[in-house]
Structures are given as C-alpha cells and as structure tokens.
Amino acid sequence: MTIAIATSDYFVMGETFINRHIEHMFGGDTVVICGRFNGTDPYDKSLFERRAKLSLKDKLLAPVSALSGAALYGTSRLPYGDNRADLATFLREHKVTAILAEFGTQALVVAKLGNDLGIPVFTYWRGTDASAALTSRQRVRSYRLMMPRLAGMFSVSQFLLDNLAKHGVRHPNAHVVPSGVDIRRFTPGDKRPGSFLAVGRMVEKKAPHITLNAFARAAKGRDAHLTFIGGGPLLEPSKAQAEALGIADQVTFTGAVPHAEVREHLLTTEVFLQHSVTAQNGNTEGLPTAIQEALACGCITLSTRHAGIPEAVEEGTNGLLVDEWDEDGFAAKIGEILDMPDRSAMSAAARATAEAKFDNDVGLARVEAVIRQALQG
C-alpha cells in the first residue's frame, strides 16, 4: 500500500512529525505531494511539487479556477488544468491507495481530487490550522464543505478537535493521536542540577519575554542556568532583555540547531520551560512535540494551561502549570522547583507519562490501523 503525504514545504528539518510519517509510514512506502520543494530529499522519495512553474494554459485558467473553487468549495487552492492532470497521473503511476494531508489546509488542496480518483483522503490537525485559521469565515466554510470528502481525520490533541467542533467542523472518524516521540532515543540522562531549557521558535505564542522575566525573578544569582534553543523574530530582543535583566551570564541563546542537538540538551536538562500563549491572531499550539520529548527525557515541565498541554503535563505529578500570561505564577513555580530538595520523583513521572502516552511507534501503528480500516470499509 502506497500513501501520499501532502505537505506545504519539503524538506523542513523542524517538522519531525511529518518527516517521521514520510520516512516510516507503512514501512516507508510513501510518496510526497508538496507545495514547495527546497531541493533537499533525505528520504529519496518520489515527489510532486504543486507550485512548479505553470503552463500558459494554467496561467490563463487561474482566475476562473480561483473563483469557482471559492464559490463551490470555499477555497481557491484546488489543482486545475495541466497541474491537476499531472498530479492525477503522479498518483496513478505510483498506485497511491490513500492520501494523508499534514494540516487541514493541505487537505483542502487534495480532498476533491482524491475523491474524483477514488483515493481516500485523511488529514492531520496540528495547531494553526485548527486555531488561527478558524478566525476566517471562508476557511471555516471550506472546512465544513470538506468534511464529507474525508475518510477520517487525526489531531494531536483533543483541544483542537473541540476547537473545530465549536465551529461546526466535525467528522465521525476522528482520532486523537499525538505527534509522539521516539522514547528509545529520547531517554533521561545524567541531569545537571539547576539546568533549564526552552525550545521553539522565538515568536509571540512562545512568549519568551515572560519566560525570561520569570526566570530572572526566581533564579537570578542562584545556581541555575537557562538555555534557549530556537531562532525567530524575537531572538535578538530576547538577548537584549537578558542583558537588561542582569542575567546574561545565566542564559545561553543557541539560535536554531539540528534536532539531534536538541536531544543532547534534553538528555541532561532538569527542567523544561514553555510559556505558550494564544497569539493575537488566535494562533495556538496543538500539543508541542518539544514537551513530549522533554517528558521522555525525564525533564520536569513547567508550562501553561494552553491548548493540549494539560493533556500531557499533570499538575504536581510530572510538572507544573500556570495560566497564560501569568508571569508571577511562572516565577513562583520556577522558585518552587529550585527549592525542591528531591526532584527525582517528578522526573520519573515525566518519563512514565511519555512511555504511556507518547511512544511514536504506538501512535504510528494506530494511524496506520485507522487508515487500513477505512480502506477495508
């Protein structure tokens, strides 16, 4: 059985969940449909680039296709003309038996074509596609119109499914399957006392300024060090903020690093920090992969009651939680952790949570089972 994985950009190093599907789903019997191809293909996959140069015919058809797609299906992104014919040929030649669209916005592109070719289409909701995207009435309409075209859908958290349901976007074959983590590679190492780590793009919904302010209030002058991994628009302002707070010697900013290097940090880190918040445009997390990886590595996790995070972090058991934007509470919890005489029980509970809930081999097998069942049906 050959599965086509539909994604916006390929290859993106940080999209570990998508890359895992491309590499491992159904024994690696996969092909890729992407919006843009950056020239890097570590898995040596057959791929179709949807946004390749348009033929003259397709350029002339573009306005008509956009208008008709928006009117009938709520989206102007449906393949058309020569591009559609080429994609259909690609799917037939590779004997694709199902399509898995990573993100609901990608499912909008391929759902109708899949139906026309008799190929079941599934989608995976992961965050922005089921939060910020829902602020658009047209996007909500397009999602609703798409539901009958899907054979099933997956979400990284119950929070996202509930968020979709509030907007009338429901499917009877819906499943919560977190992105997961390789619990055989991400394991607890020898922890450095007082070590803190934050991982992710330095953007609004990660609120790095809250993390820095709270860390400065609770840990300044104490035996504690915070490492920030990630690039983004708030990286340089965050460096300046650390200087202004007088904690530059207690904070290290690495910028973006390879995933293997993130793992090395997690192995020896004692406490993982992630102050996720809802961005002004409504954008939220789904259930951050970084938190799942941190738990697998036995990191005590301090985060927020945001999106699917409470589905992973159990207050007082494997970590601690505060409300979004609660800088006072975040600082107090950092101090509480530093004052713990023994942090081993909470660290062990973090690892146990990952083993029980986030083993990606188990998650991948479950996704495959749902797809197989739908194909048999």
Image (tube, helix red, strand yellow):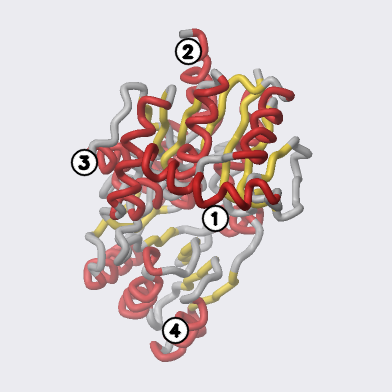
The residue closer to the viewer here, 367 or 244, is 367
Q: Which residue is mark 3?
A: 166
Q: Which residue does the image show at 61% across and 19% down from the upper left?
A: 97
Q: Which residue is mark 2?
A: 373
Q: Which residue does the image show at 50% across and 27% down from the upper left?
A: 121
* Residue 115 can be seen, yes or no: yes
Type of the residue with mark 2? Gln
Q: Which residue does the image show at 43% across and 50% down from the upper left?
A: 288
Mark nearest the camera among 1 and 2 is 2
Considering only order in the chain, which callout, 2 or 1, is on the residue closer to the N terminus?
Answer: 1
Residue 181 x %, y %: 53, 40
* C-alpha span from label 1 to label 2: 37 Å
Considering only order in the chain, which callout, 3 or 2, is on the residue closer to the N terminus?
Answer: 3
Type of the residue with mark 1? Leu
| Disc 1 crowd, CA 10 A, few/some/many (<14, 14-19, 20+) | many
Considering only order in the chain, which callout, 3 or 1, is on the residue closer to the N terminus?
Answer: 3
Q: Are marks 1 and 3 in contact (CB under 8 Å)?
A: no
Residue 73 x %, y %: 39, 38
Q: Which residue does the image show at 48% across and 52% down from the upper left?
A: 290
Mark nearest the camera among 2 and 3 is 3
Considering only order in the chain, which callout, 1 or 4, is on the residue closer to the N terminus?
Answer: 4
Mark nearest the camera among 1 and 3 is 3
The residue closer to the viewer here, 165 or 52, is 52
Q: Which residue is mark 1?
A: 266
Q: Which residue is mark 4?
A: 242
Type of the residue with mark 3? Lys
